[in-house]
């Protein structure tokens, strides 16, 4: 049975809170796409893509972040940042949830933007 995206996002949010990050927004949407989680690590805004896979077949969770998905994430992040002043430092991370029981892997700076 595969874990739903909503469950994976909740696990990722709990994990990141446990690491000392503060959740700012969930499922931020713009006309360009959606960012699963926007969090703060100190002064840094972190845009987080959460990926879940029940198995590593076909490359697992990390391999599912395609070039098209990265482009949508970057455009959506720019949309979010248009309303933020002054512009903070920011980065793109990925939280990968896989297996049962769930294993969580946090990849900082997963996407160059």
Image (cartoon, rainbow, N blue to C red):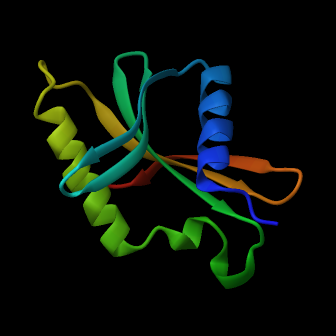
Q: Against 72, is 82 above or below? A: above
Q: Against 8, is 44 above or below? A: above
Q: Position of residue 78 (x, y in %)?
A: 17, 44
Q: How many marks can you see? A: 0
Image point 59% across, 43% down: which residue?
9
12 lies left or right of 101: left
| Of residues 14 and 1, the one drawn nearer to the viewer in this rendering | 1
Q: Quadrant of the N terminus?
A: bottom right
The image quarter in which residue 57 lies? bottom right
| Residue 113 seen in the current view | no
| Residue 112 seen in the current view | yes
Q: Against 78, is 72 above or below? A: below
24 lies left or right of 5: left
Q: Position of residue 26 (x, y in %)?
A: 44, 35
| Of residues 38 and 105, the one drawn nearer to the viewer in this rendering | 38
| Of residues 64 and 89, the one drawn nearer to the viewer in this rendering | 64
Image point 59% across, 18% down: which residue?
20
Q: Position of residue 44 (x, y in %)?
A: 35, 25
Image point 56% across, 73% down: which residue?
63
Image point 67% across, 32% down: which residue?
15
Instruction: Kindly give the residue lying farthest to the right in the view shown.
Output: 101
Q: Position of residue 48 (x, y in %)?
A: 45, 43
22 lies left or right of 19: left
């Amino acid at each position: 049975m595969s874990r739903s995206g909503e469950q994976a996002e909740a696990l990722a949010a709990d994990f990141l809170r446990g690491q000392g990050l503060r959740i700012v927004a969930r499922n931020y949407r713009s006309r360009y796409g959606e960012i699963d989680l926007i969090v703060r690590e100190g002064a840094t805004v972190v845009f987080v893509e959460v990926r879940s896979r029940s198995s590593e077949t076909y490359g697992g969770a990390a391999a599912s972040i395609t070039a098209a998905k990265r482009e949508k994430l970057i455009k959506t992040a720019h949309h979010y940042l248009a309303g933020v002043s002054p512009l903070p430092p920011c980065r793109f991370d990925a939280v990968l949830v896989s297996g049962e029981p769930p294993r969580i892997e946090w990849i900082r700076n997963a996407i160059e933007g």
